[in-house]
Image (cartoon, rainbow, N blue to C red):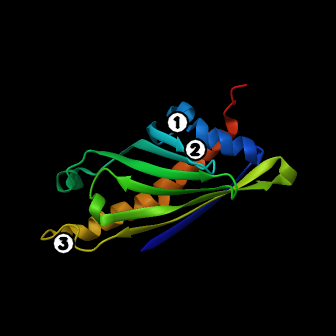
Amino acid sequence: MKTFRSLVVLKRPQPELWLAMRDYMVDFAGDIGDIESIRELERTTDANNVVHIVNRWRVRQQIPTMLRSVLKASELSWIDRNTWDATSDVCTWAIEPNFLTEYIACSGTTAFASAMGGQGTRVTFEGEFDLKPGVLGKLSSLESLLSGFLETIVTTIIPRNLRAVAEAAAAFKLPQ
């Protein structure tokens, strides 16, 4: 299991940044470097006012040619199931990639805390990634290549994308 953590402090009050990221991410996603699109598939609010959202993310990063046929995928995308609990200022999430779903587990939290005397927000992104062994069966010689590729995505691309999303949310003008 591989863990990862990222921290960013942004000059935007916590309630505004929370709202922008929860409710408007789809609107500014196309302006973020690695992200091709984020599409909201489902949104519900439970009896405790906790918001549950399912998004499909597509990124511009391509799967290396030698892994495409093994993975039976040419694009890098995933389903993000997230839960936004305003009582704790934490979003919990789980990612389901568009390939090898039964072998990959990735989940974590994004916590929002007031910073800069209420003028900013500290966003802490933490998670864990697990690639179950035997994913490639008889092609075990490629397994270390696949594992290295996926760990790169998890430890660099996903945290970098979160930082870019948080920065874009901090710059996003909320509708009045």
Q: Is tag 3's residue or tag 2's residue first in the polypeptide sequence?
A: 3
In the rendered structure, the answer to whether residue 69 lies left or right of residue 108 reads left
Of circles 3 and 1, which is in front?
A: 1
Residue 80, relative to residue 168: is it above or below? below
Residue 174, relative to residue 157: is it above or below? above
Q: Which residue is mark 2?
A: 165
Looking at the figure, which quarter contains the N terminus? bottom left
Q: Which residue is mark 1?
A: 29
Q: Amino acid at mark 3?
A: Ser
Q: Are marks 2 and 1 in contact (CB under 8 Å)?
A: yes
Looking at the figure, which quarter contains the C terminus? top right
| SS at circle 2 | helix
Q: Determine the residue located farthest toward the front in the rendered image.
A: 47
Using the image as rendered, state which of residue 20 and residue 51 is in the foreground.
Answer: 51
Image quadrant assignment for residue 15: top right
Q: Which residue is mark 3?
A: 140
Instruction: Answer few, some or many: residues within 10 Å of disc 1's Cα (few below 14, many 20 plus, some between 14 and 19).
Output: many
Using the image as rendered, state which of residue 93 and residue 165 is in the foreground.
Answer: 93
Q: Residue at x 45, y 40 (%)?
A: 42
